Image (cartoon, grey):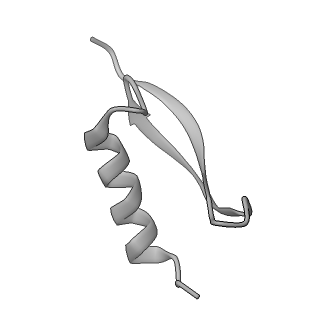
Amino acid sequence: MSLKIKSYTVYGPEKQPLFYHNYLFNDWQNKAVNIKIMKFRNKYIEKD
């Protein structure tokens, strides 16, 4: 399997984009990737 670069957007409760980022993944809906996305958000995005 080859990894491909895709972009994803993570939306907040009001459907506002929290951040945009490029990530290497095969299937970005894979739970492991989602966990990495959430860790990225928790580390770099301030919560209300």
Q: In the image, what residue occupies the spot 38% across and 75% down?
A: 43
The percent position of residue 39, horizontal first and vertical second, equals 33, 64
- Report which quarter residue 14 is drawn in: bottom right
Q: In the image, what residue occupies the spot 27% across and 11% down?
A: 1
Name the outermost residue toward the bottom: 48
Quadrant in the picture for the C terminus: bottom right
The percent position of residue 2, horizontal first and vertical second, equals 32, 15
Relative placement, left or right, of 39 versus 28 is left
Q: In the image, what residue occupies the spot 33% across and 32% down?
A: 30
Instruction: Say if 25 sits above or below 15 in the image.
Output: above
- Report which quarter residue 37 is drawn in: bottom left
Q: In the image, what residue occupies the spot 45% across and 67% down?
A: 41
The percent position of residue 11, horizontal first and vertical second, equals 63, 57
Instruction: Say if 48 sits above or below 30 in the image.
Output: below
- Report which quarter residue 31 is drawn in: top left
Relative placement, left or right, of 14 versus 28 is right
Name the outermost residue toward the front: 13
